[in-house]
Every structure is written in C-alpha cells, then in structure tokens.
Amino acid sequence: MPPIPLPQGPARLTADFDAPTGPLVHGATGSLYGVSEDGVPADELLDAIDLTSLAAKPDGGAQHPGGDASEAVAVMRRNERVHKGQGLVFVYLQDLFAEWPYEDAGIDVYHERLCAVVPPMLTQANTGRLVWVPFNEPDWIWYSLKENDQAKFDRFLADWITTVQLLRSLAPGVPIAGPNEAYYHPEFLPHFLRRARDTGTLPEWTTWHELSPRSLAEFRGHYAAYRGLERRLGIAPRRVNIDEYGNNRDLSVPGQLVQWTAMFEETKVHADMAFWTAAGGYSGAAPQPCVPNGAWWFLKAYSGMTGETVRVTPPHPNTVDTLQGVASFDPDRGSAQILAGGTDAPFTIVAEGLDPAYWGERATATVYRIDWTGYEGAAGPPVALDQVTSAPGELEVHVPEPDRMAAYWVRIVPGQAAPVEPPPWRGRWEAEHAKVSSGQVNRLGCAEDGNGFAASGAHDVSGLHLNDSAVSFSVDVPADGDYDLAIFYSHMYGRGAEATEPQPAEQVLSVNGAERIVAYPTTMNWQHRSIEVAAVTLRAGGNAIELSKSGAIGTARGEVALDKIELHERRPERHVYEGAFARRDGDGLVFDLYAGDAGYRRIDGAARAVLAGPQNQWVPVDLARPVFLHQGINRLLADQETERLTVTAAAGPDVVEVRAQDVVRAGGSLLVVNDFAVGGHVVGWNGKGATASIEVETGAGPHALLIGYANDERSGGHEYNVDIVSRYCEIAVNGASIGRFPMRGTWTWNDFWTYPVIVELREGRNTIAFGNPDGPTAEFERFRIAPLNP
C-alpha cells in the first residue's frame, strides 16, 4: 500500500459538547475468542470492560481448544454493568469444524452437525444472549463469493436460506447474523439482501469484517453505503456488528485502537477485535489472567465513558494512522471525557460548547497518557501529564510531544480539580537508531504490512544471536540517580532450529561498562512485545547502555529481538484513583487498583471497603490496616461518597513460601528438576488422581494464595492462531473444595506465571490440596500465602 498523503491543516481535534450524537454504545469493546474459559481472563480485568458483544465457537467446537459460547455468556452475565442484560455472544457455528479453512463436507452434513450442537446451547442461562453466525467469510471459504460469479452467489444463497430456516426451527427467537464476509462486498450485498428479503431469511444482524489498515479510511463509507442499500430495498435497518476488526499492528496499541473506536462509536455499531494470536488474552489486552497492559487501560477508559457522545471533528477525517477521537458528556456524573490519539505530531484538544450554566465560571481538564506496553508488558494506570483550568468557553489542552502508540484521555470537571503531580521524567530510544552490531533492522507494523506485529517506530532489531551481536545506546538523563530501564523485547527461543527446549533467554546488560545478565521471559513469538525492567543508576548527562550476546562476564543464553528502551525516573509507588471515574455498583464505587508486584499496600481515602478478589470472594477489609494485593488489577468496592483513593506501598507480615521440593505428593505426582523454577524443581505429573498438597501454620481469616505455575499444553496446529490449552486445578482447603480454576498457557514449561486465589484459613495448621480429577494440572514451582488484611 503506497503512503497516503495527508491533507494539510492544523493539528486540532475539536469536541463539541453542545452537539450530542446519542447514547454511548461501547460497541468497540468486543473480542473474538478474547475469552477462552470462564476465568480466562479473570474477572479482575473483564469487570471494567463493558462487554457489549463477544464472539465464540459453539460449545465443544473443534476449531480451537477453548472459547465455548456458554462460557462466554457466563462471563458476560457476571461482569455486565453499563448495558446490563444487553450483551450478546455471536456464535461462529462453522467453528464446530476442526480444519482451517473449514473442511467442506457439504451442506447436508453441516446441517446434521447443527442439529447436534445447537439444541444443547439452548439453556436458561443462555436465553437472550446468543446470536447465530451460520457462515464465516464465505467470500473465500466454501463459496468463493469474491469472484463475483452469479452461480456462486446462487449456491450460497440457496444454502443461506435452508440454513436460516433450519436454525429458526431449532432455536426459535434466537437472532441470526450474516452474511459475515471478510470485507465489505458491494457487488454481493444487493443480491444477498434482496433474496433474503424475498424469502423471509433476512438476518437480524448484518455482519462483515474490517481487516485492512484501509478500513480506517473506508469504514464510514462502507457503513453509509450499506444503510443506503437498505433504504433502496425497503428493508428496515438491521443492527450491525463488525465482528472482526483490526490487524496485529492495531491490537494492544492504544493509539491505534482509538482510531477504530472513534469510527464504531460514531456510527453506533458493535464490533469485535479480531483473533490473530491466542485465545484468552482479550485480543491483546490481557497478557496474563489478572495483569493488564496499555490496551486494557484504554478499554477501561472507553468503557468508563458515560452519558452521550458528542460530535468530534478530527483534523484529517477518514485517513489512516492520524489523530482521531471520541468524546462524551454525562451531566449526572458531572464530567466530560475525551479519548484521542494516533499521531506523533503535536496537537491540541479543543473542548467547545461547554455551557457555563452547567460548568460555572471555571472548568478543569486533566490529560493522561495511556501508554503502549507491548502485547505482554504489564501497565500501571494512565500517567497524568498536565492540567488546565479556564473558563468553559476557552478550554484547550495541548499535547506537545505525543507518542503515536499511546492514547490520550482527557477528563473535564466543573471548577478547580484536585491538582496532579508532575509526571516522572521519561526518555525513549529506538533500537533501530542505536548502534547495531551483527543484527538486522526490520520494518514491520506499518500500514503497508497490516498484519505485521506492532513495533515502536515501526522497526525492531533481530538476529542478535552471534557472539558479537550488540545494540548500543547513548542516553542522556537529567540528574544523577536511580532509574528504571524498560527493555521492549520479544522472543520464542527454543521453538526454532535451536537445539534446546523452549525457555527464557538472556542478554548481557552493560551500563557505563558495568555488566550483568538480564533474563527475559518467553513471549508468544519473535514480535509479540513484552517489557523487562532493570533498575539502573545513572549520572546526569550522557550514559552508555548496551545489550549484547556476550561480554566480559560471559555469553548469554538464547536470543531476543529488541524494539526500544525507555528510562523512567524512579519514584516511590503511589497511585491516585478518583471516585468520579470509578464504576458504580449499587450503592458503592468499584476502584481498579493496580499493583506492579504482589505485596502489602496502604489504601487511604476510605475507612472500610470490600476486596472483590480474583474469583469474586468479596472480602471486607479494614483500610486502617495494610491490604495484600496480588500483581495486576485488584477490585475494591468503597462507599459511593469516596472522593479518591491513594495507594502506596506498606509493610506487612512475611509471606510464607512453600517450594516444590517441600510439597506433599500422592498418587503419582512427581518432583521434577527444572533449572528455571524457584528452588530448581517443579511438581509435575499432577492430576488424574495424583495430588499435591501443602501444610501451613496461619492465623484465622482470609489469605492470599499465589500459585506459581507453568503450562505449555497445546492443541494441534493452526495457520496463525496459537492453540494453547488452559489446564484446570481443583483446590481444596482443609478437605473442602473451594473451586476449579483454569490456568492459561505460559508459552513454555520453563516460564512461570502467578495465579492468585483468596482462601479462608483457620487458626493453626491448614492443608491446601491441588488436583484435577479430569486431567493434568499445570506444573507448580511454589506456593505463597499471606494474610489478606493483617
């Protein structure tokens, strides 16, 4: 695709709050296979997203190991807030087949399979929640509609009619969606709508996919053309779901997602992010079950917009990779919000139409940056950059040095808002601009390479496997002191020609000549970015940072690809969460508290609250005492009058740790050597009658249980999806089962993630057992236990 020349004009994005455009739909939050099991991702992440639609396979479908529709419905029912009772699961019925593209067994066989899979899904729990999608991308699968051949059109239409008739006889009242082609197909749609109209088989939802960077320029035209086609044919407007959108370059990237969101919210359609990688990661927004990245914070901010949208005028409408935005106003909550991004050129956000009769003499706008942290890098809350207070008719927010990968979130409140601290200093250096020795610079993630994975600056550096491979950075910092070095990297070392099993990789890190080894957990592939953070001490001015294969201390294991490095001024952990933007839950407010690592925190701003827990245990906590938070998001329910919460690190009792070698094993569970595990061993071959248990002395009350596990079970192969399999673990405390929990794949048997659970323990000795009567569990390296609210 040739570069698109941008029209010239000032970089000003205007939100007109005197021009409402309708209630918020939150349609762009959907995801295809974003939920793999009930519990993956955890409710800690899904609770904050307005789940307007999900796309899944029929229960037991063979296309992928996870992603059953009924599990998605269960997740949706439990986590709905804004549009309670309205969320829908779009069931890709052809995903009952195992092959990709689907094996063409003939329409009669397909109908027989539908008769087997559809009725069991018609449960009370699923009532009003399912939408059948009988065909997926028939433009190239089974029917070749893209050839624009009338005979092929007729063959599909004949099968469409009989399939819709069958589904309506099997499941009366369940809506149907279609035709569901891989792109907007203007040559075919008139034939489809006319024949479906004349045969009484019109779908309740019209669906197609937008899977090209050009969609950012063309979707509004597609939508307008479709509505015009309905009018010409005398068809009442159908609801629209773009049930696959975006490319790898878009998913996980706030600055890309805001461009898609602006289009879909403006046209009030539903849309599901595409499935290009692995199930259960919410299309690149949930790197681990409870751990968010920058895309999750974007979806949370978007889902938290309430009231009505207002007209937004970007400087370059319908142009790929440019500044776009969406804005809303909610008079009941006394706030206006704007989400914008998509450019690295300085821009100004202008808030027009703020009525002084409502806002008063002054209004305050606070702008936050929602950073891209890769597909797998953990992200804390958005960073407050600036605050502007002025008369409502003069409110403008300037963003002088934007990051194209980031989104910018503006919150406007009446009067003078509580001041925000200046942001910590941050510097960024691209790997492709550094001195590269024995490595290769690659261009990817650009509009010409739509399904290439995102990279900062649209480049990365790979091939760093030779002994003299190195990337050398010259960096300048403003002051002597301690900094956090964030290394954006990716690797799947051990899955190629390497004569080793998949495992974490290493590099030699040199800071002004002082060397050490830095270890990198495995990522999904060689472009699936994550972040490894190393503490460094630097001098004011110039410093030399090098990442290399070898150094004076020896040769590092494996190989990684590098995208960029960032340096962040280190400050004591402190996060402030405003009550005005927490989620309402009955008479309370739900705050999403972030912890970069597991440990005790002091929470100021309320006297008492309820910790939701990763499995919705809803445990009361006394905020005069420290609270143990697991890594990632922790939901806290506080009184509705809570103005804000401030969270800082706190001291607490020592965490009890039980390593694999101290676990009691029975029924064939084995202790297995693993050099990458804490303690050098894991508990393996557990489940199917084999159990592992630990015994701990504790006080009475709720405790955090952190399970260190690895799981690299996979199912078959797919052209581009990584079919990881979640392994279940049933946990029993003092002989009583507390639940059965899915543990998502960790990419290798040598990479360990943490699964958090809250358990109620008694005074004295407690026994906690781990097993799975139906199959194997993950492998366990250690268990950590801490009082929740000592």
Image: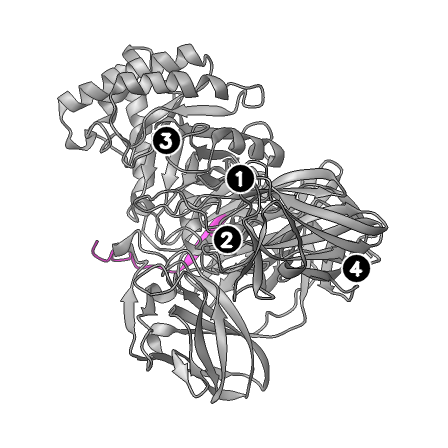
**Disc 3 versus disc 4: nearer the observer:** 3
Magenta span: predominant SS is loop
Q: CA distance from mark 1 to mark 3?
A: 24 Å
The picture places residue 291, in percent across and down from the top left corner, at: 57, 54
Q: CA distance from mark 2 to mark 3?
A: 24 Å
Magenta stretch in the rendered image = 1-15
**Disc 1 versus disc 4: nearer the observer:** 1
Q: Is 425 included in the stretch rendered in magenta?
A: no
Q: Is residue 61 above or below residue 452?
A: above
Identified at 66% across, 38% down, the residue is: 739
Instruction: Using residue 178 as the reference point, say whether residue 627 is left or right of it.
Output: right
> Badge 1 is on which residue?
775
Q: Is residue 776 above or below residue 132?
A: below
Q: CA distance from mark 3 to mark 4?
A: 48 Å
| Numbered label attached to residue 626 | 4
**Disc 2 versus disc 1: nearer the observer:** 1
**Label 1 sits on what residue type?**
Gly
On-image quarter of the C terminus: bottom right
Label 3 SS: helix
> Badge 3 is on which residue?
95
Query: Which of 459 and 468 lies nearest the eye of the viewer?
Result: 468
**Label 3 sits on what residue type?**
Asp
Residues at circles 1 and 3 in contact by the CB criterion of under 8 Å: no
